[in-house]
Amino acid sequence: MCKIGYVENTLFSLNSIIFKLKKFQVEILETLWHEIAFFLGITNFFQILSSGDYSSFLTYDGIVAIISPIVPLLLLLEFIMGMVHKKPQTKVYQTAFLIYIFNRFIGRFVGIAMITICIGIFQKYAPFQTTMTWYWFIYGNIIFELAHFVYHYLAHKVRLFWCLHSTHHASEQMNLSVAHAHFFLEYPVADVIRTTICIILGMHPELLFVVMFVNGTYGFFIHAGENIMKDGRMGFLNKLILTPSHHRVHHARNPLYIDTNYCNLLNIWDKVFKTYQDEHTEIDIEYGITRKINSGNFVDVYFGEFIALFKDVVKAPGIKNKLAYIFYPPGWDHKGNHNTAKMIRDEYIVQQVQE
């Protein structure tokens, strides 16, 4: 009788374990599906489809649900075209994918309330408030572009910010996966700067979110590489807005191209502040950063600039020099052997004029 009881208990335990394993497998598959759906931007789209209320597609959330999957699907198309053209750029996709996964994991433990906090603090100081009209939408895009320019400029000119931003520039090839390659703290810092400027200049939060969505979606598109768009100039639009051609220039380390084209959609502010640069067909673009880097190494791409900054700060004499390494442009040297992007570009332009 005891043996029967023992066998029954054992079978019960085994069944319980099997049940838990199956439940765990289901949870893993569900989590995997949610992550894939999140990456592809199709979660809200399928929610609206399953609800049967197709009129929701005419609302703001519905429009977002339709537009959100476009860039991820373009990324998949680009990857397939790369395989077809035998230019797979595997190293770029692999590193970008690892960064995306790492950021998703870390992002679960990092507050994403920066925009809300900035709105709460600075909205009361705005001299006026916009509304959801077409003319304020134009105003909002111009102002957001200014805010983006300010952050993006600082990201290249302040070394600490460059440490956050360099991950995005490390790739030695250009494709849509590069848009996902960011240090996890870069977006919160960028959002604090951009949101503060926009809110102080009167953008209503509702309008800000719309403009951010439009600019964010277009910001992914301008990373399109040659596998999906051979000529990134987009015809006459190259004179009116920022195109993939302009952004390829921005990601280049060529002396003429370095630290130019900071805008995202409207290149008006690059022209105002004289950081605008067209692509020259006779110059082959060299992507990446000036520091020697293994662009296929996750640690070097993600933490390499922080490690280099740490070494410079440690060896620098005195607090003044240590702070200078942190807040002065990349390439600044306490011994006077400066090699900043501005110096590299200015020297190249002078040489071209002399020749």
Image (cartoon, rainbow, N blue to C red):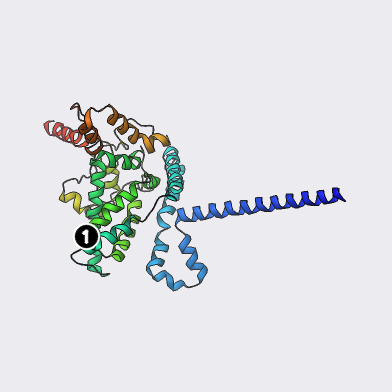
Outermost residue, front direction?
2
Horizontal side of 221 relative to 33 (left or right) equals left
Outermost residue, right direction?
1
Q: Which residue is mark 1?
A: 200
Of residues 121 and 299, which is closer to you in this image?
A: 121
Q: Measured from the top left, where is residue 51 in percent x and y?
A: 51, 70
Horizontal side of 182 relative to 54 (left or right) equals left
Q: Which residue corresponds to the image point at 43% horizontal and 49% vertical from the top-left? A: 109
Q: Which residue corresponds to the image point at 42% horizontal and 49% vertical from the top-left? A: 107
Q: Is residue 84 depicted above or below 201 in this figure? A: above
Horizontal side of 256 relative to 20 (left or right) equals left
**Total of numbered circles in the picture?**
1
Q: Secondary structure at mark 1?
A: helix
Q: Is residue 295 depicted above or below 230 in this figure? A: above
Q: Which residue corresponds to the image point at 19% horizontal and 26% vertical from the top-left? A: 335
Query: Which amino acid is tagged 1?
Result: Ile
Of residues 47 and 191, which is closer to you in this image?
A: 191
Q: Measured from the top left, where is residue 124 in percent x and y?
A: 23, 64
Q: Is residue 148 depicted above or below 139 in this figure? A: above
Q: Measured from the top left, where is residue 226 in percent x and y?
A: 36, 44
Task: Say whether residue 236 is visible.
Answer: no
Q: Quadrant of residue 323?
A: top left
Q: Measured from the top left, where is residue 211 in percent x and y?
A: 30, 61
